[in-house]
Amino acid sequence: MNKQFHQNSASSEVIVSFSWLLTYLKKSYRVLTFFGITGFVIGGLIYLASPKIFEATFTLKLPSANAISPLGEIEKHIIKPVPTALDVKKTLLQPANLSNDVVMICGFEDTNEGRKKLVNSISSNIVNYDSGLQVIIRLPGANVAKLCANRLSGELLNFSNNEKDRYVDYANRSSLIKNSMLVNENAQLTAPIRISDGVVYPRLNRLLLGCLILGLLLSCLIDWVRYLWSRAR
C-alpha cells in the first residue's frame, strides 16, 4: 500500500527537466512573446512619462588656515581646513540652511516639502583627505541641474569663506605670534561644474530589460496558477 502511495505521489508531481522546459517553451511561446512584448512596451511608456534626471557635479576645495594651540599660539606648520568638510556637508542636510534663491532656481517651491525634496536631490562626499567636498545634484533637465549647481556652489563658497574669515579674525586677535605668519586661503572650485552627458535616471536599457523580464515572469506565474487550479479541481 505504501509503495502504491509513493508511486501516486510521484506521478502527481511535476519533474522539471531540460526536456520539460523545452516542451513548455514550445507550447507557450506565443503567450510568453505576448507578455514579453507587453512588458517591453510598458517599459518604454514609463520611460517617456518619467522626468529625465541629469546630474551636476562640482568639488569644493575648502579654505584653510593655521591651527591654533591650546595656549592661543598659531601652529605655523599645521594647516587645516576651516570649516571642516563635515561642517559644510551638514549644512546641505538641513533644509532651513538653503536660501530662497537656491530653492527656486533648483526648480522647487519655497516650502518645507520643496526644501526637503531639494535636500534629497543633493548628495556629497568628503574627498582629498578631508580638505574637499564633492557635491552631486540630480534634477530633471540638464539646464536646471546646471543653474542649481552654479547657485549652490556660490553659496557654499561664501559660507565657507565667511567661516574661515571669522576664524582668522579670532586668531589675529588672540594669538601670540605675528599676524603675518597666518595662512589665509579662500575656498575655490577645483574644476568647472560638470553636467552628465545623458540621462542618469531612468536608464532606458535597464528599464526595458526589467519590464521584459517581469512580463515573462508574469506569464510563467499565470501558467503555474492555472496548473494548480486544474489540479485542485
Image: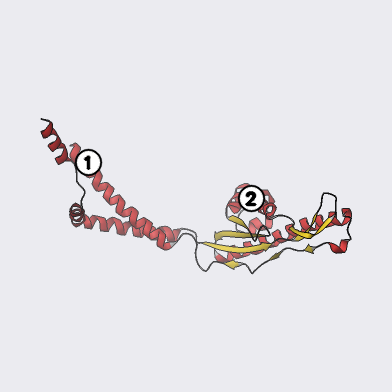
Q: Of all residues shown, which one is farthest toward the front?
A: 77
Look at 77% across and 55% down and name the residue there.
Answer: 163
* 3D distance between C-alphas at marks 1 and 2: 52 Å
Between residue 160 and residue 49, name the one nearer to us.
160
Q: Which mark is residue 82?
A: none
The amino acid at mark 1 is Leu
Q: In this view, does 93 lie to the left or right of 196?
A: right
Q: In this view, does 17 lie to the left or right of 191?
A: left
Please identify the quarter of the rendering in which residue 61 is found: bottom right
User: In the image, residue 174 lies at what x, y percent?
Assistant: 88, 53
Q: Is residue 218 above or below residue 191?
A: above
In the picture of the structure, the residue carrying the numbered disc 1 is 228
Look at 30% across and 50% down and name the residue there.
Answer: 218
Circle 1 crowding by C-alpha within 10 Å: few under 14, some 14–19, many from 20: few
Q: Is mark 1 on a helix, strand or loop?
A: helix
User: In the image, residue 222 lies at what x, y percent?
Assistant: 26, 47
Q: Which of marks 1 and 2 is nearer the N terminus?
A: 2
Q: In this view, does 5 lie to the left or right of 52?
A: left
The amino acid at mark 2 is Leu
Circle 2 crowding by C-alpha within 10 Å: few under 14, some 14–19, many from 20: some
Q: Give the number of marks.
A: 2
Q: What element carries label 2?
A: loop
Look at 30% across and 54% down and name the residue there.
Answer: 216
Q: Which mark is residue 93?
A: 2
User: In the image, residue 199 lies at what x, y percent?
Assistant: 49, 64
Q: In this view, does 29 lie to the left or right of 139?
A: left
